[in-house]
Image (spheres, grey):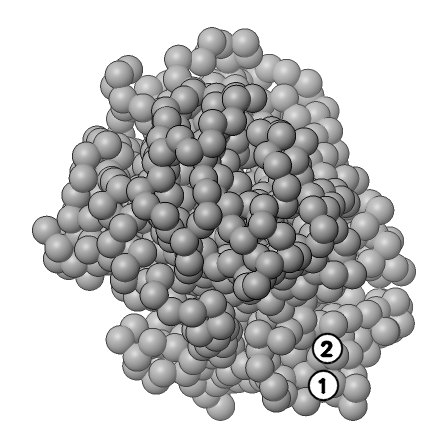
């Protein structure tokens, strides 16, 4: 490539530095806030609660089954611009793009019960009387004479404390029949003068799905003076139980003229009522304040795994809030006795499989790209159990999951995301003793299609993909199962399949399955089958192999939530091969500059990010620019590592980081169960999973002077890893050199073995781009695409 002159480098660096001065992402060391104080004080749970970030501000512990949070009428739960709370429900997922959860909204009221629709009996509230921190939420309700509601949680229980006005008609409404998705049937039972039990069967996430059932039991700290149930508009005082298919619930009434406080603890189980009762006995016995303190301590321990030094308070709050959201899911699915409901809808015991915690809620199309790797690094014990849980889904339902909610498959999104999720677990050493079990499940998934009567769609277009090398785009093809169809997005499905094939090829070769590895490696290059030389971009093909749909790469037809511009970089297994297709490194670099509006970015990175890249929530379509609020091109900024311009990766990543702020609007889009939050955390540290499903971590300039990671010695013998970048700032943000444990490191990536054996990664930064990382072998090499001889042949292709 023609080397940029030092004058041009100096000019570009000065322009970008000037544009970024004063931003939250690069603050001079002299202005940095010194470390100290609880890290939980730095978390703002309201980030992402506006403009469809779809986060929730309520109480949860890391990976907890319960997420007790207010619902305001927003489809995903809490919307910052809403002014009424309908109830505090027990199940929420951070950043989902369709209604999901919201089971058993509970609301305190006073007076006679005249309404049974929570949209009508909802209470007003104001943000100036609302607060939240990890494991705790509080709000003053302005209706019903003024009631203070407080929430906290354990893993399997949610605890509520309500402070009422003095009245003999203080009510707690337990709404079993309304939620954020469709409620099919419910049963409510008043067991005694302090206890109410429910069973709620619901379904739906974006489209109709299989039903699931969650069991709840709520225990009050004192007897209620009266109770009843409702079915539709009919309220029946004294009724101890009923079953219904619509609006349905129960209420408990208290006299608060002497004692104004009422506490209630709700336990969940996805197994049965007995499981909910056991969870309540095991976790629900402490007082509200002790439970709150325990939740805070659990979060402090979790956040304390990452100690960041430098940056101002806004940056630190944004960073630790993202780290907090990264630990909210997947969620515990097994009861305290180890029982869980499998995807065969039968009860199983984790003890029968060696003992582990069973997890559920799998947004795999999202999380395989960022969050899975962050959890493997910081929570490898839990990550191992998560991977084992996914393997149990295969054993019990007959197929690996795509997007699983609770005990059912939703089939939302496309491609084959479970493969890089599990191969990542394998590469990170989390599947020891289960390697062949995992490989067998992945091989079945990669080489076949689920039967017509199976809930899963798997690689729906696999027959055609295996025969022709691409998944066809079949416009208007009827869906045979609920959820999304790979045939609706044949071009992007092909890219996702090929990525997964590469990662499986690597695993197969490691395990000695050479013939399989060769097959998968050949398939990993199938991205070339949908490359249209006449346009220079990927393009959908029909069943006969003819390129179809608009030739304009800014059109979305054939791609899922994106365009050919945004998907062209989704070849992390073979970026050198992809760059050759579009004319080599220099032409690819020009295309990247256009994609990121790089010249505009140099002048005003924050404005470019907000006005050129991001055009509004769910605006995924018909664009030729980077979309940092959605998954398909999350890796794209790191493509510059492969064109030999690593400083441009830093420029783009740091511009994208300006989208994360300490405000309700401070998310780039749906959090997607921690995906976007994990992107922010890893990119801020300067170590990012550029080849999801393997063990490569790309490097860019950190935004902190120092980050200390505490690691699990079972997986990382040193027990810690430190990343330093002294003096990193708006004016000094370009890598001059990198050292790993004191030795020079000119590659733009690390491997997981580097993290295991190393102790310190040191960046030296400066005001101008340098030659660091520009050598021929500095970029992450291809993975899973064939032998050395085959790769040499590819270079001549």
- At 61% from the left edge and 88% from the top edge, which residue is drawn? 36
**Distance CA(mark 2)–CA(mark 1):** 6 Å
Pinpoint residue 564: horizontal percent, then vertical percent.
64, 32
Q: Of residues 170 and 438, which is closer to you in this image?
A: 170
Pinpoint residue 749: horizontal percent, then vertical percent.
50, 67
Q: Of residues 16 and 101, which is closer to you in this image?
A: 101
Q: Quadrant of the N terminus?
A: bottom right
Residue 556 in view: yes
- Relative placement, left or right, of 545 versus 533 is left
- At 20% from the left edge and 48% from the top edge, which residue is drawn? 339
Q: Of residues 114 and 212, which is closer to you in this image?
A: 114
According to the image, label 2 marks what residue? 313
Question: Where is 325 relative to 291, above or below?
Answer: above
Residue 632 in view: no
Q: Disc 2 vs disc 1: Cβ atoms closer than 8 Å?
A: yes
Q: Earlier in the sequence, mark 2 or mark 1?
A: 1
- At 82% from the left edge and 59% from the top edge, which residue is drawn? 605
Residue 532, numbered circle:
none
Tag 1 secondary structure: loop
According to the image, label 1 marks what residue? 33
Pinpoint residue 284: horizontal percent, then vertical percent.
35, 61
- At 29% from the left edge and 55% from the top edge, which residue is drawn? 279
């Amino acid at each position: 490539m023609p080397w940029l002159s030092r004058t041009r480098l100096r000019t570009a660096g000065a322009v970008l530095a000037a544009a970024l001065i004063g931003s939250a992402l690069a603050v001079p060391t002299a202005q940095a806030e010194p470390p100290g104080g609880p890290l939980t004080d730095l978390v703002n749970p309201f980030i992402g609660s506006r403009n469809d970030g779809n986060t929730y501000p309520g109480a949860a512990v890391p990976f907890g089954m319960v997420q007790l949070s207010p619902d305001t009428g927003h489809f995903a739960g809490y919307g910052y611009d809403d002014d009424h709370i309908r109830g505090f429900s027990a199940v929420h997922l951070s950043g989902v793009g369709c209604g999901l959860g919201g089971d058993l909204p509970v609301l305190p009221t006073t007076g006679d019960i005249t309404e049974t629709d929570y949209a009508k009996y909802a209470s007003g509230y104001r943000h100036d009387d609302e607060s939240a921190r990890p494991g705790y939420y509080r709000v003053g309700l302005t209706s019903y004479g003024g009631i203070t509601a407080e929430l906290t949680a354990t893993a399997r229980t949610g605890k509520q404390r309500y402070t009422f006005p003095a009245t003999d008609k203080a009510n707690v409404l337990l709404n079993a029949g309304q939620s954020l998705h469709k409620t099919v049937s419910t049963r409510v039972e008043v067991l005694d003068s302090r206890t109410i039990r429910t069973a709620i069967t619901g379904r739906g996430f974006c489209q109709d799905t299989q039903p699931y059932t969650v069991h709840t039991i709520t225990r009050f700290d004192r007897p209620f003076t009266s109770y009843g149930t409702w079915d539709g508009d009919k309220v029946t005082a004294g009724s101890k139980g009923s079953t219904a298919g619509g609006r349905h619930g129960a209420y408990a009434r208290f006299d608060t003229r002497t004692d104004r406080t009422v506490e209630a603890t709700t336990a969940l189980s996805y197994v049965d009522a007995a499981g909910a009762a056991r969870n309540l006995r095991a976790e629900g016995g402490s007082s509200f304040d002790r439970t709150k303190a325990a939740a805070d301590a659990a979060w402090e321990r979790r956040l304390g795994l990452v100690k960041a030094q430098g940056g101002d308070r806004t940056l630190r709050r944004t960073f630790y809030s993202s780290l907090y959201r990264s630990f909210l899911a997947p969620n515990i699915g097994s009861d305290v006795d180890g029982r869980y409901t499998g995807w065969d809808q039968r009860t199983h015991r984790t003890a029968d499989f060696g003992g582990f915690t069973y997890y559920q809620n799998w947004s795999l199309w999202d999380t395989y790209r960022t969050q899975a790797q962050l959890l493997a690094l910081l929570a490898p014990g839990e990550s191992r159990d998560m991977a084992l849980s996914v393997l149990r889904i295969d054993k019990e339902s007959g197929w690996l999951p795509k997007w699983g909610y609770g005990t059912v498959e939703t089939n939302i999104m496309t491609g084959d995301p479970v493969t890089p999720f599990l191969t990542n677990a394998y590469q990170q050493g989390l599947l020891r003793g289960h390697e062949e079990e995992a490989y067998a499940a992945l091989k079945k998934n990669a080489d076949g299609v689920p039967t017509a009567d199976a809930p899963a769609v798997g690689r729906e277009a696999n027959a055609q993909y295996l025969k022709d090398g691409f998944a066809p785009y079949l416009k208007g093809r009827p869906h045979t199962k609920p959820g999304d169809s790979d045939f609706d997005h044949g071009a992007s499905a092909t890219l996702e399949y090929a990525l997964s094939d590469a990662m499986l090829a690597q695993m197969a070769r490691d395990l000695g399955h050479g013939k399989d590895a060769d097959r998968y490696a050949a398939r990993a290059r199938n991205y070339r089958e949908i490359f249209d030389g006449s346009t220079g971009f990927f393009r959908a093909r029909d069943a006969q192999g003819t390129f179809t749909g608009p030739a304009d790469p800014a059109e979305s037809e054939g791609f899922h939530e994106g365009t050919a511009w945004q998907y062209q970089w989704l070849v992390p297994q073979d970026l050198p091969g992809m760059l050759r297709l579009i004319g080599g490194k220099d032409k690819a670099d020009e295309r990247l500059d256009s994609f990121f509006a790089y010249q505009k970015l140099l002048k005003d990175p924050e404005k470019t990010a907000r006005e050129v890249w991001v055009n509004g929530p769910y605006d995924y379509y018909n664009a030729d620019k980077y979309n940092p609020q959605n998954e398909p091109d999350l890796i794209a900024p790191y493509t510059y590592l492969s064109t030999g311009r690593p400083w441009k990766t830093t420029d783009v990543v740091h511009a994208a980081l300006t989208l994360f702020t300490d405000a309700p609007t401070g998310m780039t889009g749906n959090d997607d169960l921690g995906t976007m939050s994990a992107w922010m955390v890893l990119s801020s540290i300067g170590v990012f999973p550029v080849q999801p499903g393997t063990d490569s971590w790309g490097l860019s300039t950190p935004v902190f002077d120092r980050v200390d990671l505490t690691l699990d010695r079972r997986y990382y013998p040193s027990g810690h890893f430190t990343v330093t970048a002294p003096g990193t700032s708006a004016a000094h943000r370009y890598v001059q050199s990198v050292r790993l444990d004191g030795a020079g490191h000119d590659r733009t990536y690390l491997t997981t073995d580097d993290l295991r054996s190393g102790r310190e990664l040191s960046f030296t930064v400066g005001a101008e781009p340098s030659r660091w990382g520009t050598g021929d072998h500095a970029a992450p090499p291809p993975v899973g695409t064939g032998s050395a001889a085959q790769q040499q042949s590819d270079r001549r292709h």
